[in-house]
Image (cartoon, rainbow, N blue to C red):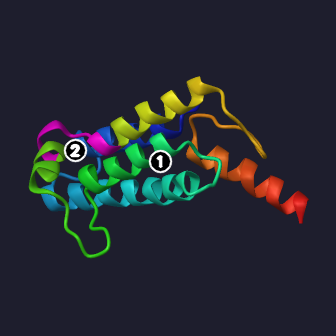
């Protein structure tokens, strides 16, 4: 299994421990920045025509409900902000992590290879395949 989500969870834990910041708003902004990168990659992966529809809907729903960052002008839900501030972790990242483990367990083969548990690795495989095909 990859360390993609583990790395993000560790970064947030370090921020939460106060090793990098002690301010509430700064912490929320830092979590939002970490989530934004993950959301961008997850959205690119789930947008692929061979990505399973049920997991696409699930993951995009998780993003809509649990993202700390503002998306398309829509502010995060107050309960999402409360969770991050009180628990010191991102529910979104935790749930996406679990969803990508579900994806990897399926062992789905695509035109560019097997879908694993790392969005960034899936994108690398897809990009390499598409470059070779053109």
The image position of residue 117, as x and y in percent, is 56, 34
Q: Is residue 87 left or right of residue 107?
A: left
Does the stretch in magenta take in 49?
no
Tell me which label, 1 or 2, sits earlier in the chain.
2
Judge depth for marks 1 and 2 and give the one in front. 1
| Residue beneath the point at 22% across and 55% down | 27
Q: Are marks 1 and 2 in contact (CB under 8 Å)?
A: no
Q: Residue at x 53, y 52 (%)?
A: 46
Horizontal side of 65 relative to 47 (left or right) equals left
Reply above or below: 32 against 91: below
Q: State the residue in front, 32 or 129.
A: 129
Which region is colored magenta?
Answer: 85-92
Horizontal and vertical percent position of residue 103: 54, 32
User: Which residue occupies 75% across, 57% down?
Assistant: 127
Q: Secondary structure at mark 2?
A: loop
| Residue occupied by mark 2 | 18
Q: Is residue 26 left or right of residue 71?
A: left
Q: Is residue 90 visible?
A: no
Residue 112 as seen in the image, left or right of residue 123: right
Compare residues 2 and 111 and report the one nearer the observer: 111
Does the magenta stretch mainly form a helix, a strand or a loop?
A: helix
In space, the residues marked 1 and 2 are separated at their CA atoms by: 35 Å
Taking the spot 23% from the left edge, 42% from the top edge, the residue there is: 16
Residue 49 image offset from top left, x and y in percent: 63, 54
Picture coordinates of residue 3, whole percent (x, y): 54, 33
**Residue 90 sits inside the magenta stretch:** yes
Q: Which residue is mark 1?
A: 56
């Amino acid at each position: 299994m990859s360390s993609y989500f583990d790395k993000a969870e560790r970064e947030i834990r370090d921020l939460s421990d106060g090793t990098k910041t002690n301010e509430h708003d700064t912490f929320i902004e830092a979590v939002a920045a970490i989530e934004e990168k993950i959301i961008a990659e997850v959205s690119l992966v789930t947008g692929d025509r061979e990505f399973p529809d049920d997991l696409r809907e699930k993951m995009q729903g998780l993003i809509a409900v649990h993202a700390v960052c503002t998306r398309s002008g829509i502010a995060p839900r107050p309960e999402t902000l409360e969770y991050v501030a009180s628990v010191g972790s991102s529910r979104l990242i935790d749930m996406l992590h679990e969803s990508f483990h579900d994806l990897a367990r399926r062992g789905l083969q695509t035109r560019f290879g097997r879908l694993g548990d790392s969005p960034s690795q899936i994108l690398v495989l897809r990009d390499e395949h598409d470059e070779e095909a053109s």
